[in-house]
Image (spheres, grey):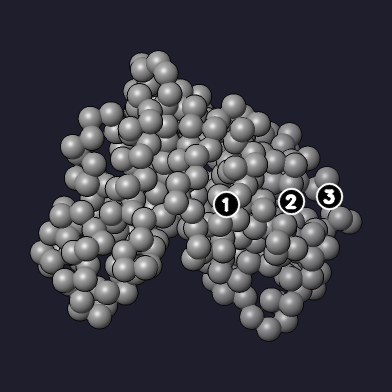
Amino acid sequence: MEIELCTKLAGRKLNIWKELLEKASLEADLSVEKTVLVWDDEVLIATGSRQENILKCIAVDENHRGEDLTATVLSELQKDAFLSGYSHLFLYTKPHNWAMFTSLFFYEIAKTDKVLLMENRKNGIKEFLDAYPRNDTSGKIGSIVMNANPFTLGHRYLVETAAKECDRVYVFVLSEDKSEFSFEDRFNLVKAGTSDIPNVTVIPTGPYLISSATFPTYFLKERDSADEAKCALDIEVFANHFAPHFGITHRYIGTEPISKMTDMYNKALIEKLPEKNIEVKEISRVENTGEVISASRVRALIKEGEMEKIKELVPKTTYAHITGGLL
């Protein structure tokens, strides 16, 4: 048995890797950074990959199951992740693999009928949420999850609407740094842009909501099913962890005429959250000169240097940031 750690697969190795994943009903994720290949002579008998702190594409040839190859692959991926500076790891598998990965010291965060998400920290999500006080307000508790790239008057309107209707509103800002505006800037802009609304609390999502961890892009072969799985898994995390911790009774969303993926996610929220006793309120997007106010429109105007037009779309705090040379 030979173990190989590859940075980029190509040619024959890539094709053999794809074939093994295909047999395991997994889609090859070509964006992975590192891949472990376990060979028996010329035959690939096990594999697993890593993208930053997420372990995925883990498969074992059916003729070699029961040989602890999953543990071998996992060990190699973990060692490589730790050497790359990642200690908090997430893992995707199918629900029927729960016992196997639990025995390898991974712990369930959430699951659907198709996907199981685990992490290598026992009670990791609980400890994350415990850093933020539980809600002590009775009544109607609202929530909004936003990227705010950047925070606009559209976002502000959604927060204002929720704040008027609720006793307390939690605004969760996506923590993952994969936007034009950094997480730190986006978080601070939301806080500054809502600082005058006393019943609003702004909290980061950490790695647990709408992130690379909760929105797997590779897991299922059928793309439509994969998109549905992304939504379902993220909703499970929100409903089973965030909502109980903060006492959330309502979730506010804006109508989505632009992004197909966001629209699909909104529809999934509307369908699934009431089953968890969380009411979803969809608020019509605010318009300016006949167009909905969107962060993408603001970003486009920044690139075009149209600063005066931006002033009509964002709070003063966001405008000051954009024109202050801090981008």
Q: Quadrant of residue 194?
A: top left
Q: Residue at x 29, y 48 (%)?
A: 156
Q: Quadrant of residue 30?
A: bottom right
Whether residues under marks 1 and 2 lie with C-beta atoms below 8 angstroms apart, the answer is no
Whether residues under marks 2 and 3 lie with C-beta atoms below 8 angstroms apart, the answer is yes
What residue is shown with label 2? 69
What residue is shown with label 1? 265
Specify few, some or many for label 2: CA neighbours under 10 Å numbering under 14, 14-19, or 20 or more.
some
Label 2 is placed on what type of residue? Leu
Image spot of residue 264 (x, y percent): 60, 55
Quick one: 74 or 161, which is closer to the camera? 161
Which is more foreground, mark 1 or mark 2?
1
Quick one: 3 or 60, which is closer to the camera? 60
Residue sitting at the far front = 290
Label 3 is placed on what type of residue? Arg
What residue is shown with label 3? 65
1 or 2: tag closer to the N-terminus: 2
Q: Residue at x 50, y 62 (%)?
A: 257
Q: Is residue 151 left or right of residue 284?
A: left
Label 1 is placed on what type of residue? Tyr
Residue sitting at the far right = 63
Give the SS element for disc 1: helix
Residue 61, numbered circle: none
Cα separation, mark 1 vs mark 3, equals 37 Å
Cα separation, mark 1 vs mark 2, equals 36 Å
